[in-house]
Amino acid sequence: MTLELKNELTYAGRYLFRDNPLLVGRVAAELAANERRSPEELDAIGQRKLHATLQRAIQVLPYYRNLSRDFSVAEARDALRQFPIVEKATLVANPTTLYPHGGAKKPWEAIGKTSGTSGAPLTIYRSPTSVLYEQEFIKRHWSWGGYRQGMNRATLRGDLAVPIDRKQPPYWFFNRYNRQLILSSRHLNDRCVDAIIDRLAEYKADMLQAYPSAAYTLALYLAKRGRKLDIPVVFTGSEPVYGHQHDAIVGTLAHKIMDMYGMAERVAFATQCEHGNMHLNQDYSHVEILDDNGNPTDDYGFVVGTTYHNHAQPLVRYRLSDRTRWKPGRCACGRPFPMIEEVTGKYEDFITGSNGMAVSPSVLTFAFKYARNIKRSQVAQVGQGKWEVRLVPDTGWSEADRELLMHNLRTMVDAEVDVDLVYKDDLPNTAAGKFRWVVNETT
Ligand SMILES: [Zn+2]
């Protein structure tokens, strides 16, 4: 099957399921109403959803078999404290007790994949309901930026819009079901970028969804050519937006940036409003900010989240490596959701691939999240068009796994970059406890 036909079927299927008004209408109305509720009403909704999740976790995950289900809705938050904090390593170490049905996925469950901040692949099972909710939370954020369904949307993220080695336009795929122009971020290079800019200009996008690194690369090309695109808003996610990226994007590519914070585990979701504040979507999940000892703090701490909507694999008190702090007060936008400071934790260097093309760290994750048996990894730029991929293999690592990873790099990231694979016993954090998954050692 060609990639074009595959894309056609994928996006038609997604539209029928995720954007079908009959299926999503109720969820969309619920989320729109939540935005206008009082903090007390939202609190009561949260308490009910938390209670359902905790009950479900004890029921379906053997990891919690010793915990009591004897607590009421009003006691849900107290009951939460009997749950231990878990993290990615806990999930990886307990594949039969922290995954439902002993780790055997049911046909109706979707799969989420991430390579996270340590470059080790992780899989999460998702219920159809949670997939629907996720899409509606994202759409609610888009509405904050003035975007409504049916308007023209463009996407510059990790989608494999066209084969990576394509040398002629189109470097995009038009998903007619959602009026979505999906641009290939792998073709943001000297040879192909003009065709991409022309297509985007002609398309008159009402918004662009983008990785900040990809939007930044496009903005630099625009500036070099003395061109501008008048896109009303860029919705960013998956990576932090650095100051220099923000300044390059606003005014050249778009009028404003609205960022969102989320992750494959889907235990926390924050969205930036028109006043620039990050609002934690309180109806998405239960979020705690905990210090190194696991106690709540008003200072900077780890983001620890409990899902409300994924009852296929209910993640409870899941600790991310991201850190932030509660921001006191109410926002001028009037929304009832609490505010958090900028989230820190995931910093990657800027690297380039073959022909000096900028490579987004998020695009790079595709090669790793579809790989197997990797405990930890790191991608280092060691020369012009030359990368060193450092791996701590897991038990079970084989020649087939090596071939799969190399194949993924060639087909999902960069077809021509020179890659050396180096095995390591360990890839330690820096003295400050940080780990940089993508490093540029040539600067
Ligand atoms: Zn606000």
Image (cartoon, rainbow, N blue to C red):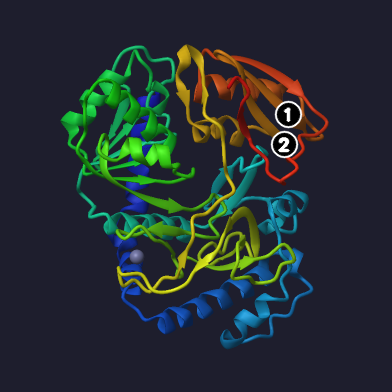
Cα distance in 3D space between marks 2 and 1 = 6 Å
Sort mark 2 into few (<14), some (14-19) or many (20+) by Cα contacts within 10 Å. many
Q: Depth check: give the residue in front, 42 or 64.
A: 42
Q: Which mark is residue 376?
A: 2
At 71% from the left edge and 45% from the top edge, which residue is drawn? 432
Q: Which mark is residue 391?
A: 1
> Mark 2 or mark 1, which has the lower sequence index?
2
Residue 40 vs 105, above or below: the answer is: below
Q: Does 241 sit left or right of 61 as displayed?
A: left
Question: Circles 2 and 1: CB distance less than 8 Å?
Answer: yes
How far across and how far down the image is residue 258, in percent? 34, 51
Task: Say which amino acid is labelled 2.
Answer: Arg
Q: Quadrant of ligand 1?
A: bottom left
Q: Which residue lies at the image location 26% right of the left edge and 19% below the top edge?
A: 194
Within-10-Å neighbours for mark 1: few <14, some 14–19, many 20+ = many
Residue 133 in the figure: left or right of residue 370: left
| Amino acid residing under circle 1 | Leu
Could you say which disc has been placed on residue 205 in the image?
none
Residue placed most toward the observer, 170 or 241: 241
